[in-house]
Amino acid sequence: MLGEIEEYIGFENVRLLHLNDSKGGLGSGIDRHENIGQGKIGLEGFKRLLNHTVFSDIPVILETPRKLEDDDLRNLKIVRNLIKQ
């Protein structure tokens, strides 16, 4: 993925990360969002992405399902815990 970002977009043009886990696998064409760590990307995938030096100072927007009142805060806490301090 990083190679494609660098080749087609350029790291310098990435200004924001839009985060959600995915119910569908890579190339499935399914745009169904899942809570962070509960989909096909998983916690390890997010940990690697969020801690990559290219994305260290880029803002993040979460777009995850909200079924319960505290879902947004729970997803945000998970993301923050994945980022190395």
Image: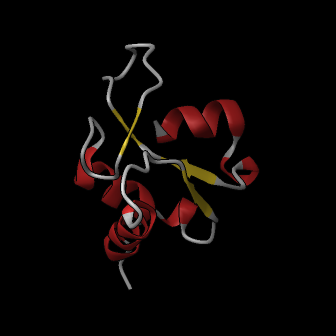
Which is nearer the eye, 1 or 64?
A: 64
Q: Is the residue 80 above or below the residue 45 in the image? A: below
Relative horizontal placement of residue 6, taking residue 33 as reference (left or right): right
Across and down, in percent, residue 64 comes to 45, 48
Number of marks drawn: 0
Q: From this view, report whether residue 54 is shown above or below residue 82.
A: above
Q: Is residue 24 left or right of residue 13?
A: left
Task: From the top left corner, tell me how far across and down residue 9 is, in percent.
Answer: 70, 36
Residue at the spot 32% in from the left edge and 29% down from the top edge: 23
Question: As drawn, is 78 to the left or to the right of 44?
Answer: right
Which residue reaches farthest bottom? 85
Residue 53, position in %: x, y? 50, 66
* Left or right: 54, with 33 as reference point: right
Q: Compare residues 56 and 16 and report the one nearer the observer.
A: 16
| Colour basis | secondary structure
Decide which of 24, 51 is in the foreground and name it. Answer: 24
> Is residue 70 or residue 23 the one in the foreground?
70
Quadrant for the C terminus, please.
bottom left
Q: Position of residue 47 (x, y in %)?
A: 32, 60
Residue at (73%, 53%) from the top-left corner? Answer: 12
Give the quarter of the image for residue 57: bottom right
